[in-house]
Image: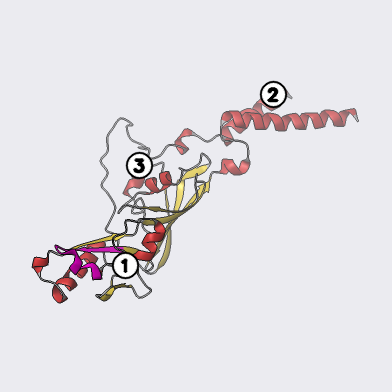
Amino acid sequence: MKKIIVFAIIASLFASCIPNKDLVYLQNKGSNSNSIEVTQEASKPYRVQTNDIITISIKALDQKLVDMFNPSESGSTETSQQGLYFKGFTVDDHGNIRIPVLGELNVLGFTLDEIRQKVEKQLLDEYFKAEANIFVTVKLAGLRYTINGEIGSPGTNVLYQDRATIMEAIANSGDITITGNKKEVQIIRKFPHGFETHSIDLTDAKSMNSPYFYIQPNDYIIVKPLKQKSWGTGTTGVQTVATIVSALSLVTTAILLSKNL
């Protein structure tokens, strides 16, 4: 009986403990751990899609001349998600935004820099001369993403920066739990033709070459659980031993009681 218990404990340890290689991010698999690798960024300029929210700020030497082109309450410094929602320009189903005085402007499929150039050109063609020194800034109203599954703080978050990696999004959401599968993190991304799903292995440093390593607005990230969680035997050796010993003790007690009956 003792041999059976020992064998069961050893087998469970090998089967249910989470190996270290499944826990460490961005490993240089198959290469010298002391080597230094230079990875080129796979990020491309983001092209605006429907339902995106962008902010446009127009400045000039005489600010009073351009105040009418800016949203109301332009002097407010509020940068909350609610504030950006109400003061930003939402891209409608036709790919247009409505700017005060300038009217409708199609921005679907354009980069932020291309939108800036379009706004500047229209201002100079219709309202101002070059001497006015028009200065236009166009930004996304934060990188909004949703993350669920084996994550510390699931839900919808906003990163107020122009670009962010999936690693930053995960860190901002409390990191992946020990029972989360870092080898198969799913990203559901919106494209003009619909939604696409892609998986990325965050334990492999080569994932930095993936076009999905940089998140985009409205990305939906899903962290699946490891099989060890569904087994319920524990995530560490100590937890597994305790669980197995408790289970075997119950079985042994039941056997002894049945023999005495």
Image depth: mark 3 or mark 2 in front: 3
Q: Are marks 2 and 1 in contact (CB under 8 Å)?
A: no
Residue that badge 1 annotates: 72
Q: Nearer the viewer, mark 2 or mark 1?
A: 1
Secondary structure beneath dot 1 equals loop
> Which residue is depicted at the point 36% across and 56% down?
143
Question: What residue did someone put label 3 on?
Answer: 205
- Residue 230, by quadrant, is top right
Q: Which residues are magenta?
A: 55-68
The Cα atoms of the two marked residues, 2 and 1, are separated by 78 Å
Q: Is residue 90 left or right of residue 243?
A: left
Name the secondary structure under disc 2.
Answer: helix
Sort mark 2 into few (<14), some (14-19) or many (20+) by Cα contacts within 10 Å: few
Farthest residue in the right direction?
261
Residue 58 magenta? yes
Residue at 41% across, 46% down: 172
